[in-house]
Amino acid sequence: MPAVGMVFVVRKLQLATLLVLTCLWLPGNLAKAQETPENLVLVTLDGVRWQEVFGGVDLALIEDKRFTSEPEILKKKYWHEQEILRRKQLFPFLWSVIESHGVLIGDRNRGSRIDVSNDWWFSYPGYNEILTGRADPAIDSNDKLWNPNVTFLETLNGMEEFNGRVLAFGSWDVFPYIINTERSGLPVNAGFAIATPAQTERTEWLNEVSAEAPSLWSTVRADFLTNGYATEALQSQTPRVVYIAFGETDDFAHDGSYDRYVDAAYRTDQMLAKLWNWLQATPSYRDRTTLIITTDHGRGHTPEDWTSHASPLDAARQMTGSDPDGIPGSNEIWLAAIGPHIRTTGLVKGHWKQSQIAATALASLQLEPAQLMPQADKAIAEILQ
């Protein structure tokens, strides 16, 4: 072939290659090539103390006959002289997987603090603060009142890419009001509600068990039912955002049953381990899902007050002769997180607020919290990457 002809062919091939590369890297194709949808699972454990999370079981409460019916059994299962082993026996998932591959906040003995910022230090105000990113002084009871504030769940559900793919499950029957299903239209399976329609055989089984299982409390169902509905929905509906609110721990504590409180906390940790293993084994969720775990309030430090929680404002309102300072420790909470946009530094030192959780959840989805929820507190930047 003549040299001129050879040059023409080479240039033609170069132009063709450039055209192909240009088409591949057009903005639309670039976005498509890089599209890796982010997911979020937020879990709350009602009224679990940071003392157990970071220190394991409390020997004083184990040996107090008022709170533990079979102390030797509890000690055999959970007690160890060394704190790092004791806490791992109670929360093996938190202190193996999350400590190694995520972050924890709330060990006040080591300079890590997170507190509620609402004035009441009990459940509805706490959940409102977690989900909306700000404390509302008007949320001052646990009554079944429609929440006037918009949660980040509702905000996400209003976005095209999340619409119909945000779900919530709770053991406490007040969650439909906290998330305001009347306004938000979000599906919330909570309390003693069943799944309608029952789309899978397992959901049918859960509905049957829910109807037949004995009720320990009038407003809170067993956590295994909440977990069952949530995990079945994850498997059958592939939502992008799921909120799971467990409740047994707080109610067993209010009952003064430390052994059942501890067992419930351990069972929840096991549920979280199975959930995380499933997420990591499922292609649509693996390495694309953030798990955030926290609590709505703390509770007392001592055997005399660990069963309860109250702020000074709440104690003054109750007028029952309780301490005018409330119950110290009720405002002290904790947080754990793991995921593709969460740092892997274990315990993080500093001081944060419960109101920062909503923005942190949004940021973990690679969204701009300030644009979506300008009224919310800022995200916890120290745990994000």
Image: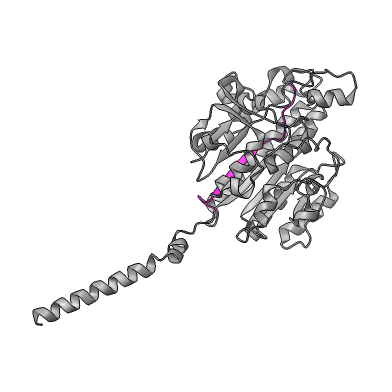
Please say if 250 is above or below 173. above
Judge by depth and name the residue closer to the eye, 334 or 205: 334
Membership of 295 in magenta stretch: yes
Residue farthest toward the left in the current orientation of the protein: 2
- Out of 223 and 302, give the one closest to the viewer: 302
Residue 69 location, quadrant: top right
Residue 135: horizontal and vertical position, in percent?
Answer: 72, 36
Q: What's the residue at 60%, 49% (across, down)?
A: 371
Our reading of the magenta stretch's main secondary structure is loop
Q: Is the image coloured rainbow, by chain, by secondary structure, or in one colour?
A: one colour
x%, y% of residue 310?
A: 79, 26
Residue 124 in view, yes or no:
yes
- Residue 246: x percent and y percent? 72, 41
* Residue 273 is at least partly visible in this image: no
User: Magenta stretch containing residue 219, yes or no?
Assistant: no
Q: Residue at x 69, y 39 (%)?
A: 130
Find the residue positioned furthest to the right.
320
Q: Which range is magenta?
A: 285-300
Q: Which residue is drawn at the image coordinates 73% and 63% (left, top)?
A: 199
Q: Position of residue 336 (x, y in %)?
A: 59, 36
Q: Quadrant of residue 319?
A: top right
Front residue of 60/294: it is 294
Is 285 rendered above or below residue 272? Answer: below
Q: How many marks?
A: 0
Quadrant of the rendering where the N terminus is positioned? bottom left
